Image: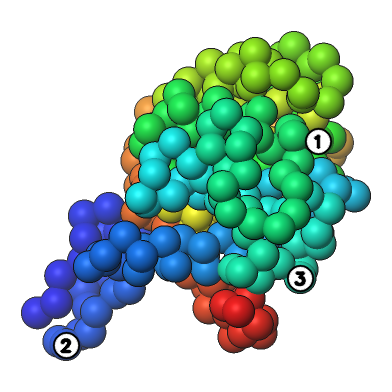
Amino acid sequence: MSTVPPALAAAVGPLPDGAVLPLPPAFESVEEERRYRKEQLAAGFRIFGRFGFSEGVAGHITVRDPGDPNAFWVNPFGMSFTQIKASDLILVDHEGVVLEGRRPVNRAAFVIHSRVHAARPDAVAAAHSHSLYGKAFSSLGVPLDPITQDACAFFEDHGIYDDYRGVVNETEEGEHVAKALGAYKAVILKNHGLLTVGHSVAEAVWWFVTMERSCQAQLLAMAAGTPQSIDRETALLTRGQIGGHLAGWFQARPLWDQITASDPDLFD
């Protein structure tokens, strides 16, 4: 009888004999893992584009290079999320030096993500954009409440950076963002938007997607009346069921299957 990983046991029943669940892959070489991460990153941008998580040239997703922990891959400045291919990605180090690529890097992307990656060695990927409901909710300066099952993934697992000072241009402010993120999976940047991290691009992208929708749900509930929160014990239990690294990676699979089927050129 096939078994289900404990991290997914709350969502998956017993598997038929011979059936397997997709799990994060293992790699035999750094080159193989690098190619995979870059393809995942390109797919992540296509997903952001599909959801409309763009506002001019704002927004970025990064993934740490498997061969150099002090460098990360990021989108070219000013390129549409919907057109990014793996070959378009830029490699930049934590000092802002472009190591590979033909286009410039968004300075805010370097300033924020370099400090996040430096402060969080476990954070393989980080995602940020000026999504509509995320930036609307961020203006309230309050955390997400556990008013839905999905929002429980972030219960007592996200911070708030409440010192907006304009477009992020200095590494010192990036350090403040990283401090507000702490050991959490996400941080709300007041008057700015959302930022999420994960052990994979898929995980970071999924947390961003579902956090954005949780912001939307809370805004709608607040507009309609007084939302009723889930009690703390149940919220923590639910976070344990749906808020782990493997659960985040796995919940992104339908989005990945959809975008790679519809946009095969992202692998170029």
Q: CA distance from mark 2 to mark 3?
A: 39 Å
Read off the residue under disc 2.
18
Mark seen at residue 83? 3
Q: Residue at x 65, y 19 (%)?
A: 171
The image shows residue 34 at horizontal and vertical percentages of 41, 61
Question: Which quarter of the rendered picture does the N terminus lie within?
Answer: bottom left
Q: Earlier in the sequence, mark 1 or mark 2?
A: 2
| Among the two numbered marks 1 and 3 on one chain, the one whose residue lies closer to the N terminus | 3
Q: Quadrant of residue 236?
A: top left
Which mark sits nearer the N-terminus, 2 or 3? 2
Instruction: Give the residue pinned by disc 1.
Output: 135
The structure residue drawn at horizontal position 22% and vertical position 84%, both measured from the top left corner, is 19
Indicate the amino acid at tag 3: Gln
Q: Position of residue 158 (x, y in %)?
A: 54, 28
Above or below residue 96? Residue 62 is below
Judge by depth and name the residue closer to the eye, 144 or 45: 45
Q: Amino acid at mark 1?
A: Lys
Q: Looking at the image, which residue is at 75% across and 47% down?
A: 104
